[in-house]
Amino acid sequence: MNQKILIIGGDVRQLEVAKLLFAKGKDITLVGFEQHPEHTIINEKISLQEIEFHTMDAILVPVSGIDQQGKIKAPFAEQELVLTHDQVNKTPKHCVIYTGVQTSYLQDLVAKTERKLVPLFERDDVAILNSIPTAEGTLQVAMEQTDFMIHGSKVMVLGYGRVGKTLARVFAGVGAHVYVSARKEADFARISEIGLTPCHLNNLEQDLSDVDICINTIPHMVLTSSVLANLPRHALVIDVASKPGGTDFEFAKQHGINTVWALGLPGKVAPKSAGQIIGNVLLELLS
């Protein structure tokens, strides 16, 4: 039997996912793209009230999940979209909800409806591949927000996880002097092994005193007011961490520190590639 997939809202990445799944023979229904200029042959609905939830094998919500009020981020929708417990309860028991990241609303939703939730961005394959457009987008932001060359500048990357590794490599590749701030001894060894300079997160106040660009990947407060106060006046802070981020943005704003919270870069700089990454993993999971 052909699998029926409901894709609700989101940005251009979701359209790319829809096209890929449709090309592979999946029965796709889209909600929340009425205002997008591209005409597709995929079945489109204006509201969730039109959906026959009892026929759906899977539901894909935007990468950012669903907010505390149940609202779905849908920039191309004509009306507000809210996925409710009652709607999910109408789906078959085997129906799986796919998201980018988990949110408390989604966790409560699947707990009460006894459905399965799959946060795609917690998978290594998705996160590592997605780090590539994130790093390219970060480099683009850095070039747009500075009046000096990236080549030869001092760049500090905070965190050496899946995104931090790619960021460090990309900025080193264009000639920046890259420092990486982490906590683990194994990370220090690996950072040194690839020719970069390791730093300890406990020493941020001192280590950031002469940087040109600071890039944060850690999704909890690391760039506090006391740390930010030590930045040079010309320095740029780019925070790519998911909500709530890792920067005291209010302090930065009050003190004129150039700060960019660069959320969702893959969807902005490379939506086709980012959508294909999600779509290919979905195909694997659906099979």
Image: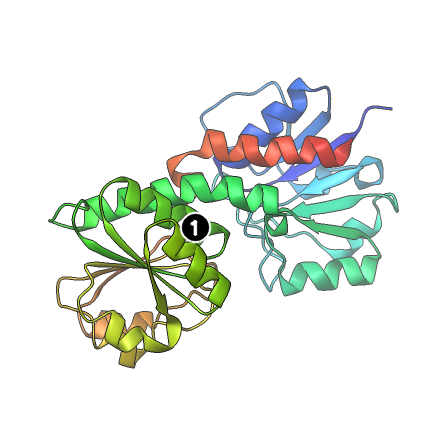
Q: Secondary structure at mark 1?
A: helix
Residue at coordinates 59% horizontally, 55% vertically from top-left? 71
Residue at coordinates 22% horizontally, 43% vertically from top-left? 175
Q: Residues within 10 Å of mark 1 (few under 14, many from 20)?
A: some
- x and y percentages locating residue 3 in the rendered image: 79, 29
Between 173 and 148, which is closer to the camera in this rendering? 173
Q: Is residue 284 above or below residue 233?
A: above
Tag 1 residue = 165
- x and y percentages locating residue 185 in the rendered image: 47, 67
Viewed as shown, does residue 138 lie left or right of 143?
right
Between 287 and 10, which is closer to the camera in this rendering? 287
- x and y percentages locating residue 39 in the rendered image: 52, 20
Residue at the outermost bottom position = 226
Q: Is residue 78 above or below residue 19?
A: below
Q: Is residue 40 above or below residue 200?
A: above
Which amino acid type corresponds to the residue marked 1 in the rendered image? Lys
